[in-house]
Amino acid sequence: MQRSPIKASSHPDLTLENVSQNQESIRNINTRKRRNPDEQQLEDLKSDLLKSFKEMMTTEIAVIKLQNSEILQSNLEIKKQLEENAANYKDIRDRLLTLETKHEAAIERINLLETQVNVLQKQFLKNIIEIRNIPQHDNEDVQNIVKNVYKTLQIPVIDEHAAIYRRGKKKGPIVIEYQNAKNKELLLKAVKKYNSANKDKPLSTDNLGFTGAFSRVYISESLTFMSKKILAAARELTKNGSYKYCWASRGNILLRKEDGQPAIVINSLNQLKDFASE
């Protein structure tokens, strides 16, 4: 008996591919069927951990994004505040500069007025002499005290037109207001001559016959308030050796650096500051 030949398929490749896929599926199924339960549990745990990690990372990233957004917003607010502060600082600085300019102008104006007042006061005091450190007593006669000073200094009779009085209370100076500068200069030259001739015993309360505590007596022209301040400051320059001589003459304060050098008239404290910085 003869067998009929097997007919070949019209799609041999497709049939072979399907067979191969089926075989692979069967092997996977068999593999799963053969997998140990512990391994399956481990796989499930890995899957759960991975899922939890992804969820956690998603949450963390969202939180970080929110924080970054808040930080950016805060930075913008800080920047805005800094810009406002810078603007305020500039405004305050400009105001301060304006105030400083006005202050400097006011100081200059005050100095000018003080100088003008000082000139007027010098004119008023130009013929006035002060005798300091004469002890004060009840019912004292300042006329006789001044006459005694004149006698000690060997000066002719005092100008009868001169006004003589005690200024202030205790330890206040005795003031002589002359009618002219000639008599004032006569007294100043006489006391200078007397002290030069009696360096060991210059004019004092003892020379003038006063009892009690010894006190050196000073006779000088009356100075304005500003001139007194200038004189005190100028004397500091002689104390530290910057200048050799310091004195007052006709209401002016003068300095001389060395013997033979010209005298310098000091008109203000600022002028002295310049000398002190030399």
Image (cartoon, rainbow, N blue to C red):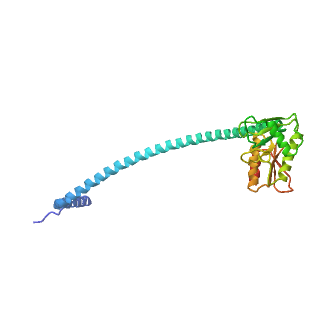
Judged left or right of residue 60, residue 224 is: right
How many labels sit on residues? Answer: 0
Please tell me which residue is depicted at 64% across the width and 38% down the height of the picture: 95
* 272 shown above or below 114: below
Judged left or right of residue 40, residue 124 is: right
Image quadrant holding the C terminus, namely bottom right
Q: Position of residue 212 (x, y in %)?
A: 72, 45
Please tell me which residue is depicted at 56% across the width and 41% down the height of the picture: 85
Judged left or right of residue 121, residue 186 is: right
Q: Position of residue 24 (x, y in %)?
A: 22, 61
**Along the line of sight, which residue is nearer the eye, 134 or 67?**
134
Quadrant of the image occupied by residue 222: top right
Please tell me which residue is depicted at 85% across the width and 46% down the height of the picture: 153
Image quadrant holding the N terminus, namely bottom left
Residue at the outermost left position: 1
Q: Position of residue 148 (x, y in %)?
A: 83, 42
Residue 119 in view of the camera? no
**Along the line of sight, which residue is nearer the eye, 188 or 94?**
188
* 145 shown above or below 33: above
Quadrant of the image occupied by residue 225: top right
Q: Position of residue 219 (x, y in %)?
A: 80, 44
Quadrant of the image occupied by residue 136: top right
Residue 14 in view of the camera? yes
